[in-house]
Image (cartoon, rainbow, N blue to C red):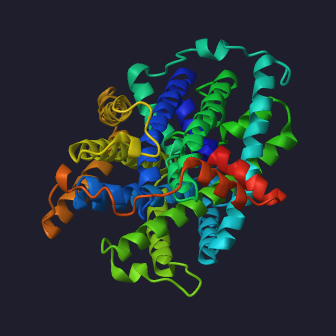
Amino acid sequence: MDGLFIGSGTALSTGPGSALVAYSVVSVIIYFTMTSLGELATYLPIPGSFNAYGSRFVDPAFGFALSWNYWLNWVSTVANEAGAVAIPISYWLPNVHFAVWGVALMSVVFVINAATVRGYGEAEFWFALVKILAIIMFIVVAAAVASGALGGHKYGVELWHYKEAPFVGGFGGALNTFIQAGFSMQGSELVGVVAAESKAPAKLIPRATRQIIIRLALFFVLTIFLMGLVIPYDDPRLINEDSDASISSPFTLVFLQAGIAPAAHIMNAVLVTSSVSACSSGLYAACRTVHVMATQGHAPAFLGRTTRRGVPLFALIFCTLFTLGLWAFNFVGQGIVFVFLSGISGVAGYVAWASICVVHIRFRLAWKKQGRDLGELRYRAPFYPFGPVFCFVLICIVVFGQAYPSFENGFDSVTFFSSFIELPLFAGFWAAWKWWRKTKVVSLDAVDLDTGARGGFTIEEETEMLDRSHAKGFRARTARVLSAIIG
């Protein structure tokens, strides 16, 4: 969700139609990914999430590559947000160098992550609450601006017929928007993982799958649609590769157009909070990912060490330094680096989603090969095999389709390298581990379908346990609501 606050400007600059189509299609991809992951995670809630599934159901080298891909995804996201934090702050302090805010942000999130897990969770709880309230406020105000109730102008759908809108740049422009949409919406797959590791996966997985449709439609598709109604795609303040740090987020622009300057300042503060939250949660995911890899022998052993409070400090330092190295490229040009890192992170997210589809298909093939009854599965993906196959094909079209906008009007090096540098990296990790460890693709007969399988309880028993585990206080109830909304 954090990528939506600032990254939506890049998507909107390709036209309201392109942005709406991209976010809608990515929502479909995420839904099918969630149903596949839900089936896997309900039956096998094992440490390492879908990275571990890759090793078990496909090839140990595939799982290794998937783990490092997911780590790269998060460190790129953190570096991107560390650079983007200067965007909302420059609205107030345009003459302060962006490096001040980047270093300050990384210092804050390092301290948050170096604290206990409880301290991290406390900070993320309040960050999430602020973001949810901000998006709801934005939806109300944007709808009022579009209808003419605020701002003194009734937009309707006039901006969909403005100049080259609704699809600026045609097919190539629309394709290019998918990468930014993927970057903005990544992390949704964590909903299934968290639910699967709870006390009642058979109860929570179907609920999480249903709720994610509402969440995607309300907080992404509706938001981007309203932006396209009230903000021209060629507004010079929208971020792109030619932008500088003086631009504003679409969330701030809408309040300015509504004539509510004080609220624009509030929304700008929310954008800063969002950057802190995105960096904090991204750094948490990155250092925990590399920590688990170290314990499995997929990363240097010292990264697996933890403090007495359970904090993987060496992994945290490693991820922070690597992130700062990526962030330092902002000295070359902030707008270009934002697009470049968004592309890397977006494609890495697509690779992760496609891998979940592959793993799910292999899981079902092994299940059938070994003569298992589908009735044993506590949750079944409702659209198998169409869901994962369609999702995988769609992701391939989106990712490899980036070659079209890269060469449509001459060679665009930023689009090309940001879209494709991740693929040889993933293949390189896979090939290197396969050569080093001499791994082989796991045969369907040899796939382990039992170790770590969740057993025993009926859905009714899990529901009773879930009800008993729910606290009664305001904070616990609010946490459950936030979990349902943002995962």
**Residue under the point 60% across and 56% down:** 278
Q: Quick check: can you spot residue 92?
A: no
Task: Give the number of callouts.
Answer: 0
Q: Horizontally, is 480 left or right of 78 in the view?
A: right
Where, by quadrant of the figure, is residue 165 drawn? top right
In this view, the residue in front, 334 or 294, is 294
Percent position (x, y) of residue 120? 65, 69
Rendered-image quadrant of the N terminus: top right
Q: Is residue 442 above or below residue 263?
A: below
Where, by quadrant of the figure, is residue 442 drawn? bottom left
Percent position (x, y) of residue 9? 59, 37
Where, by quadrant of the figure, is residue 140 drawn? top right
Q: Horizontally, is 308 left or right of 351 in the view?
A: right
Q: Horizontally, is 36 left or right of 366 in the view?
A: right
In this view, the residue in front, 241 or 281, is 281
**Residue under the point 71% across and 59% down:** 468
In this view, the residue in front, 464 or 170, is 464
Q: Horizontally, is 86 left or right of 321 in the view?
A: right
Percent position (x, y) of residue 293? 37, 70
Q: Is residue 49 above or below residue 154?
A: below
Q: Is residue 382 above or below residue 351?
A: above
Q: Is residue 89 above or below residue 215?
A: below
**Residue under the point 31% across and 47% down:** 359
Percent position (x, y) of residue 294? 36, 75
**Residue under the point 51% across and 63% down:** 285
In this view, the residue in front, 436 or 43, is 43
Q: Quick check: can you spot residue 354?
A: yes
